[in-house]
Amino acid sequence: MASRFLGKVAAMVERHRTGFLIVSCAGLLGANLAFHTVPQKTFKPLYQAWVKGQPELSEKLHNLFREVLSDLQVKSENNYQAFAAFSFHPVSAGVPWLPAGCVVGIPISFDGTADDEHGIVNHVVMVEGKEVDWKSTEGLALKEALILSLEAQKFAIAREVMYLQNNGPLIHAAVAPICLAGTYVSAVAIKQLLGLYSGPVVFRGLYNLAVAIIGFVGYCLSYDTVSRAVDYRTDRSTATISTDFAKGGVEFYNKILTQNKTLRTLMGKKGEKIYAPNGNLFPRYWFRLKHPSCTSRRDLIISILSMSQE
């Protein structure tokens, strides 16, 4: 009974395969973009930081955000909203030309400076379920790594805005449907070329399984390649705004490396599996590398800075 039903479903899909392919690709694109269509309701609540019972961004960070938008010469500033985030680094979501606009989360640690550390030490940071002691050796190192100069803060925020302006979320969302369409069309063409449609069902099943595996691996490799290219392009676009932004970018990535090395110590054996001794992240899976290493991104900006000073 079940095999007969599956056979009817397969036959129906075969008859209307173009329509099913279009609907599937559109559904994948929509699902990947769903998080970015209403970022105030989907993304912001996940990263919202509460300061003294209030979710509002400090006036200092709000003015810094507006200054960055001005430096980038963003035309529709009202499409970009900032909020206080609990993360160590700025985060963002949204598509600028959609009605809901974009949101950028600015870490509350950006309120801290070398002269005033209250923006950092007044907040509780938990690592592996334990509160960080800001007076310990690791706590002092982490606090120092979280203190960024104005140039580094502006680079970190500008990088997120530039990512949104360059339609980074849309590019990432488009990878899956493009890979699906490419895999399906290629599979059908090869199947017709080899005459598998008139061949045994077992051969067709094995062929479909092989195509699915190859398609998934191809998607993973394509997504990671696109993701790294987008990251490099965003860093390059932000660093070329001015020399100050480039210097801020070098400092920003150096600080991230220091943060990661400190977290590696605080997290013990788990940290050794996540962070390399130099502060880079180890790939979660051996064949996947979604983002460039911090050292390579820093070196890219250093080369840009060197070229601008020649």
Image: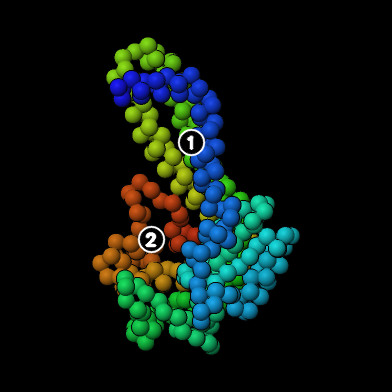
What residue is rendered at 49% in x and 66% in y?
47
Q: Is residue 203 left or right of residue 64?
A: left
Q: Measuring 68% from the left and 70% from the top, which residue is drawn there? A: 66
Mark 1 Cα within 10 Å, few/some/many (few <14, many 20+)? some
| Amino acid at circle 2 | Leu
Residue 28: x, y in percent?
Answer: 50, 40
| Local crowd size for mark 2, using a 10 Å CA cut-off: few (<14), some (14–19), many (≥20) | many
Q: Label for residue 179?
A: 1
Q: Position of residue 63 (x, y in %)?
A: 66, 75
Res. 154 in view: yes
Q: Nearer the viewer, residue 17 or 152?
A: 17
Determine which residue is flagged by label 2.
281
> Real-space Cα distance between discs 1 and 2?
27 Å
Seen at 62% across and 59% down, the residue is 102
Determine the image quadrant of residue 191.
top left
Q: Is residue 56 left or right of residue 180?
A: right
